[in-house]
Amino acid sequence: MYLGTPAAAVAPLEALHAAGFDIVLVVTGRDNRRGRGNDRTPTPVKAAAGRLGLPVSHELGDAADCGADLGVVVAFGRLIPAQLLAVLPMVNLHFSLLPRWRGAAPVERAILAGDQRSGVCVMAVEENLDTGGVYAREALEVGGDTADLLRRRLVVAGSTLLVETLSAGLGPGEPQEGESTYAHRIEPADLELRWDRPAAQLARVVRVGGAWTTFRGVRFKVWEAAVVDPGSSDGAGTLRGDVVATSDGGLRLVEVQPGNRRRMPVDAWLAGARPEPGERMG
């Protein structure tokens, strides 16, 4: 049985199916409402299960009597109750090197913290969040990846690791060792570009996706940026050309989105906005 919801959970499902595992049921989140009418869009995992001809349920309780020997959880988005785990053991493919970054947003938190390495773990599901023994793990260098790119790399590595681990048999899981950290969900406040912080830190916020500030009182998103020497001693937030001064260094804007307009190269925005010398952001 397979439990998953977003796009990141599609490749592991497809890999298990291609490897010949008998997936008796797929449990996923409910369809999302689309537009103003009653049309609904299936979750990425539900759509993938349909293509593969696999039965689908939105009810977690259906897992108890589906006849499976094991449940596989990948980004399901809901805690598994203890009473279900008592009748059906489960493993989880988690996108971090546990016990670092337990919780909902491990990829984003690893980037925000400046981690040099991330990874994937195949672990036992327990009642407590992401605390089970680890059957297998694989580490990857983060480099300068955005959250989207790093997640895609982790999904590829994790899909292979999951198939290999289940094919070989689980065996005993190793207890998690080291200091645990919790990956809280990303909130809008986490993505605000606060110019009194160092440029290197703000560049990591941009890499997460959806970073924002304000310009002339309007929300202004930054989708791509690079750390540079600001070339002046202007105060934090001061815009000169395509560079914003920070508390330490400057952030060169590359791709931006002013207000409700489309994303665009910064040169296109500058040509239209014509910022005055010394104007400030935020």
Image (tube, rainbow, N blue to C red):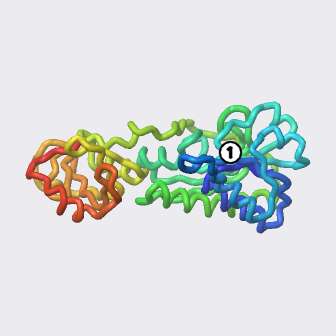
Residue at left offset 65%, top offset 52%: 43
Residue 247 visible to an observer of this rendering = no
Can see residue 42? yes
* Whether residue 21 is situated above or below residue 213 in the rendered picture: below
Which quarter of the figure is the C terminus placed in?
top left
**Which residue ends up furthest to the left in the rendered image?**
277
Q: How many marks?
A: 1
Residue 110 appears at what percent x and percent y? 48, 47
Q: Is residue 159 above or below residue 218?
A: below
Taking 213 as reference, is 133 left or right?
right
- Residue 124, horizontal then vertical, whole percent: 74, 43
Q: Which residue is mark 1?
A: 30
- Residue under the image location 8 percent in, 52 percent down: 277
> Where residue 216 appears, x then y in whole percent?
20, 44
Lateral position of residue 15 relative to residue 275, left or right: right
Left or right: residue 236 compared with residue 37: left
Q: Amino acid at mark 1?
A: Arg
Determine the secondary structure under disc 1.
loop
Q: Quadrant of residue 188?
A: top left
Position in image of residue 112 (x %, y %): 42, 46
Mark 1, residues whose alpha carbon is within 10 Å: few (<14), some, or many (≥20)? some
Q: Is residue 191 left or right of residue 150?
A: left
Give the residue furthest to the front: 37
Residue at (70, 40) in percent of width and height = 175
Q: Quadrant of residue 165?
A: bottom right
- As rendered, which of 271 and 181 lies closer to the eye? 271
Residue occupying image coordinates x 78% and y 44%: 90
The quadrant in which residue 167 appears is bottom right
